[in-house]
Image: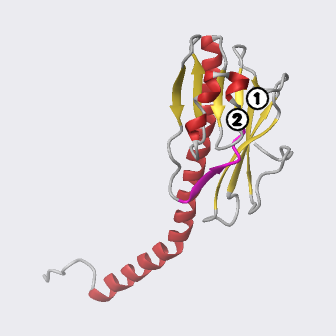
Amino acid sequence: MKNHARGFTFVELIIAMAVAVALVAVAAPSFREMIISNRLSVATNDFISALSEARGEGLRRNAPTLLCGSSGNPTAGDLGTLAAACAGAGSVVARVVAADGTVSADLIRVAPPAAEGISLSNVQPLVFSGRGFGRQSGANGPYSGPLGEIYTTKLSSKNRRCVYLAAGSSISTCAITSQSGCPSSEPQDCY
C-alpha cells in the first residue's frame, strides 16, 4: 500500500492567498468608514456626557452650573465667578463649572479632545439651574434648540451629529449628511 501525502499543493495555496487578499481589499474601505463613524459617535457621547454632568451638578448642588462654549460665554457681570471660570475656555468646549456658594467656582470637567479628524463646534453655552433646567445666559425660560455639532470631513454620508435640547432638559441627537452645519431646528427623522 502506498502512503499518500495529504495537504495543499503550491498552486492551491497561491489561489487561496489571492482570494484572501481580494476579500481584504474589498472590506478595508468599509472598515475604515466604520472606525471613523465610531469615533464620531464617541465624541458625541463625550459631549452629551458633559452636558448631562452640568445638569446633574446643578441638581446635586442646588446651584447654577455652566456648560461653557468656545465663544458666547456669559460675562462676569451676568453670573459672576461662575462665568469668569469660562473665560479661560478659549477653544476648549464642553467645560463644566459650578459655583460652590462662595466667591470661587469649581472646574468639574473639561471634555477630552476629540479624535483626529473629528471637530466640535457651535457649542451653545448654557446655565443649568438647581432644578436642572438649562437656559441661555440672560434668559429666563428653558432653552430649546441646537447645542452643538460634532462632525468629520472624512465621511461622505452621516458625517455630522447634531445635538439638541428641548424644554431645557431633554437631549436628542441627529445624524445627518451635511457640509454646512446643523439645522436650527431638529429634523423630524432624528433618533
Disc 1 secondary structure class = loop
Q: Nearer the viewer, residue 28 or 52?
A: 52
Residue 119 position (above or below residue 42): below
How far apart are the two marked residues, 1 and 2, measured between alpha carbons?
8 Å
Residue placed under numbered mark 1 in the picture: 137
How would you rate the neighbour count of disc 2 (Cα within 10 Å): few for under 14, some for 14-19, many for 20 or more?
many
Residue placed under numbered mark 2 in the picture: 125
Q: Which residues are magenta?
A: 117-124
- Locate residue 70, reporting x and y percent: 64, 44
The residue at 84%/22% (across/down) is 140
Amino acid type, mark 1: Ser
Residue 84 position (above or below residue 149): above
The answer to the question of whether label 1 and label 2 lie on touching residues, with beta carbons closer than 8 A, is yes
| Quadrant that contains the N terminus | bottom left
Q: Nearer the viewer, residue 22 or 40?
A: 40
The image quadrant that residue 64 belongs to is top right
Q: Is residue 118 magenta?
A: yes
Amino acid type, mark 2: Pro
- Locate residue 67, reporting x and y percent: 64, 31
The residue at 71%/47% (across/down) is 122
Disc 2 secondary structure class = loop
